[in-house]
Each structure stands twice: as C-alpha cells, then as structure tokens.
Image (spheres, helix red, strand yellow):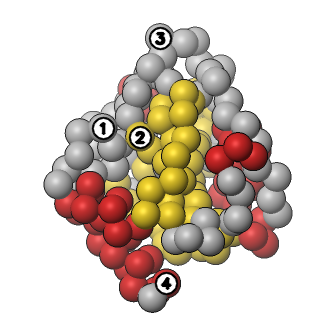
Amino acid sequence: MQKEEKEFLDVYDENNKPLNKSYDRNKVHDEGLWHHEILVIIINNKNQVLLQKRSYKKRHLAGKWALCAGHVVSGETEKATAVRELQEELGLKILQKDLEFIEIFKKSDPTNRKFSYIYVLRTDKKLKEIKIQSSELTRVKYVSIRRLIKLIKSKEKHLAFADEYHYELFKKILNNII
C-alpha cells in the first residue's frame, strides 16, 4: 500500500451543511465523517467514457476501473478540485467552464460518507495524449456508454462503481446525448 499524502477535508452534516471543521483524510474515512468528493465523467466525441484503472497500491478500490474522482481538500471548491484532479491524474489541462455540472450524489457506507459532485467533461483527447499519474493509475481506456451501462447492470466486479445509482446516471447521460 502506498503512503498517502496528508490531506485535510472539510466535514459536513448529513444534510450537507458545513460543520466548520477539517480533519485528515484518513480520520474522515476511519470515523465515517461526511465530506465532499468530485466525480468527472469524461466523454469523447464518439460518446465513449474514459475509464482509469486504479493502482494496485491504493487503499480503496485498488486495481478497479473507475472514473476520475478525488477529495475536495479544505478550502477548495468542487470545480477547482475537478480541474486539479484531471491535471494530476491524467495530465488534462482544462478550465472550470469546461465542466458541466450534473448533480450531487449522497452516498453513505461505514467508511465513506460523502457528497459527490458529478461533472461531465466533453473532450476530443486521444488515449496517447493522456499522461497518467503512475502512483494513482495503471491504465486508461475508452468504453462506449452503451457497453458501460451493460457492464454496470451486470455488476462487473472490476468496476469501482457497478451499482444502481451509476446505472441510472449513465442511462440519463445516454438519453441526453441521443
């Protein structure tokens, strides 16, 4: 397991109201405190979604195919986090205005109680133009939205997000594209 940098996260109540407190990320997860994360769905001009394979050294969801995601560190906005994560993990330089806000998803499990701010980034970037952060990721690939919906519905074990929420989310995105 890789050593993770100290990140401080602002914490919230179950209604997404700030508690005006910040704690180390590990404490937030260990104690099941509510926090903010971002999720960016990257869609290319062929209506394919970029998936990234998480490093096997990650504490959570090691080796799983995921979407670009990250914690909102204390004092940072959700959109600024999305821009930072895309730059760090994939070498993508974008502006906040390039992100399309979709919704806030509330998820609660014992170690990850979060409000995920969901964005879409439409891009024409080719895989060869993406520079992955090797400490975070091992590979990236594009998958058609239709194929991804099928994988989620079948609860594909290699996906980090094969659940009912993501199934409905991608169906909604697909319907908006057609």
The kind of residue on which mark 3 rests is Met
- Disc 2 packing (10 Å; few <14; some 14–19; many ≥20): many
Q: Is residue 25 visible?
A: no
The kind of residue on which mark 2 rests is Trp
- Residue 65 badge: 2
In this figure, which residue is indicated by the disc labeled 3?
A: 1
Look at the numbered discs 1 and 2 and tell me whether their residues touch, using CB distance below 8 Å. Answer: yes
The kind of residue on which mark 1 rests is His
Residue 103 is situated, as x and y percent measured from the top left of the image, at 49, 72
In this figure, which residue is indicated by the disc labeled 4?
A: 177
Which residue: 44% across, 20% down?
56
Q: For the residue labelled by badge 2, is the local secondary structure a helix, a strand or a loop? A: strand
Q: For the residue labelled by badge 3, is the local secondary structure a helix, a strand or a loop? A: loop
The reply, left or right, for residue 87 in relation to residue 4 is right
- In the displayed structure, 170 sits above or below 138; it is below
How far apart marks 2 and 3 lie (CA) works out to: 18 Å
